Amino acid sequence: MRTEGFLTCLTIFETGCSTLTIYVAGRLNVDYILTLRTPLIRGEKALADTLTIDYGGSGGNTATAIARFLKKPKNIRFVGCVGDDEHGRDYINLLQREGIDTALIGIMQGVPTGRAIVLVEEDGITTVISYRGANEVCRITLDKLDDMKMLVVTNPPLSIAYELIERALEHSSSVIVDPSHGWSSLNPVSYTHLTL
């Protein structure tokens, strides 16, 4: 679970943040991290020295960073999806151990939990190959969100992002968006309370 980068950003919210109900929406992946012994050349075989299996995805990393920074408060709710498989169940259990509410994590039947193959070369250059799996077909019923005071959107499906943002602004909630590459249609001018 890679959380370091987001912790610095959280310092601006430290005062009073532990009493807010924070919704985090994004992807949940299982990461296969290979440290390569030989250079990565397209069309050629490469050898790896180590294989590490970890839980990642920008959504999961962000929610975990917030929970650890705020010392496991009971007011962080995650919105996203996993597959109906062992990895998905393990990820939900991991988030729960971090103190994160997982009631809004959908379990998608017949689709695996998202995967990422992370290839780390000797000089530190990293190549990531993503299989979105359940993240791409994520469907969640968003009912009562009246307790939302802050929304952090990383990269869920755009339809979920739009619905969450609209619901957050109805409640005058703070909204933080880290746009995905495919989000060129998201117009921040339409959302005056948006932080990008």
Image (cartoon, rainbow, N blue to C red):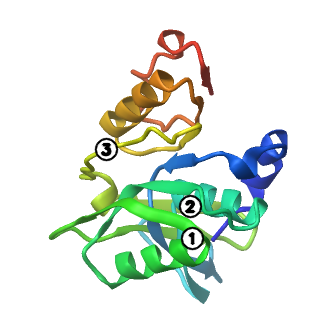
Location of residue 8 in the rendering, given as x and y in whole percent from the top left corner: 83, 49
List the residue tagged with mark 2: 127
Give left or right: position of 51 versus 167: right
Residue at the location (52% across, 47% down)? 23
Which element is circle 3 on? loop
Categorize mark 2 by other alpha carbons within 10 Å: few (<14), some (14-19), many (20+): few
Q: Earlier in the sequence, mark 2 or mark 3?
A: 2
Which residue is denoted by mark 3 in the rendering?
142
Of callouts 1 and 2, the N-terminal one = 1
Please report the residue visible at 39 percent of the width from the left and 55 percent of the height from the top: 80
Of helix, strand and loop, which one carries label 1? Answer: strand
Label 1 sits on residue: 119
Question: Whole-percent x and y of residue 26?
Answer: 46, 50
Q: From the image, state whether disc 1 or disc 3 is nearer to you.
A: 3
- Left/right of residue 156 with respect to residue 13 in the rendered view: left
Q: Mark 1 packing: few (<14 Cα in 10 Å), some, or many (20+)? A: many
Kind of residue indicated by mark 1 = Leu
**Quick one: SS at disc 2?**
strand
- The residue lying toward the viewer, choosing from 122 and 57, is 57
How many numbered circles does the render carry? 3
Q: Nearer the viewer, residue 67 or 21?
A: 21
Q: Residue furthest bottom?
A: 49
In the rendered image, residue 119, in percent from the top left (x then y), is placed at 57, 70
- Amino acid type, mark 3: Leu
Is residue 2 found left or right of 9 in the rendered image? left
* Residue at the far left in the pictured view: 110
Q: CA distance from mark 1 to mark 3?
A: 36 Å
Dot 3, crowdedness within 10 Å: few (<14), some or many (≥20)?
Answer: few
